[in-house]
Amino acid sequence: MVWPFSTKSKDDETFQKDVLISGNALASFKAESDIDARELLCLSGDYSVDTDPTYDTFVGVSMFDVQEGEALSVASEGCTVALSANVDLGDVTIQDGELVNTTDKTKVIGTCFSTQGEFCEITLKSGGVKLERGFE
């Protein structure tokens, strides 16, 4: 497997490539602070996200770098993402804002199924926040 974690610059902005490995459950939110790609995010208000999530507030992973107040795409339940995390294969949850392995099946936010160096592939599950999806 190739792990293409490169970046490219365009118009003075740096975009992370290949945060999203698979899935199409993306949601758009406003950033409450400066947020980097691959950060764990929490719901912080109406259509707003920030860092420092808990299981109960977890909504997904940031797709790219943004500054406070900008729109941000968030990978959520069902997406597989590449994250920098020191975890083993298996179920993961959030503890003190970091990913950790867990055996508590009621607090799982994803499953790590592949690791390479500091990166792991995690298929996300919903935390305490359930995003509604549908077409109007």
Image (spheres, rainbow, N blue to C red):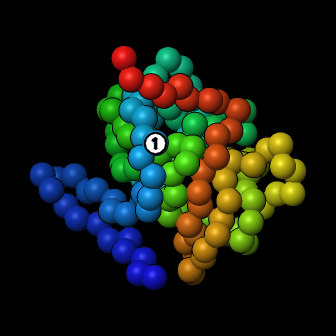
Q: How would you rate the neighbour count of disc 1 (Cα within 10 Å): few for under 14, some for 14-19, many for 20 or more?
A: some
Q: Quadrant of the N terminus?
A: bottom left
- Residue 85's place in the image compared with 34, above or below, is below
Q: Quadrant of residue 55?
A: top right
Q: Is residue 99 visible?
A: no
Q: Quadrant of residue 29?
A: top left
Which is more toward the observer, 28 or 85?
Answer: 28
- Residue 121 horizontal side relative to residue 99, left or right: left
Point out residue 60 in the picture as x, y percentages from the top left corner.
55, 43
- Residue 102 horizontal side relative to residue 81, left or right: right
Q: Residue under label 1, please give it.
A: 25
Point out residue 23 in the picture as x, y percentages from the top left corner.
45, 52
Which is more toward the observer, 54 or 125?
Answer: 125
Tag 1 secondary structure: loop
Q: Quadrant of the C terminus?
A: top left
- Residue 77 horizontal side relative to residue 32, left or right: right
Which amino acid is tagged 1?
Ala
Point out residue 109 in the picture as x, y percentages from the top left corner.
69, 48
Count of numbered tags = 1
Residue found at the very far front of the displayed protein: 135
Q: Residue at x 55, y 29 (%)?
A: 131
Point out residue 94 in the picture as x, y percentages from the top left corner.
72, 49
Q: Residue at x 39, y 32 (%)?
A: 28
Residue found at the very far left of the displayed protein: 11
Q: Residue at x 59, y 57 (%)?
A: 123
Q: Quadrant of residue 30?
A: top left
Q: Is residue 128 visible?
A: yes
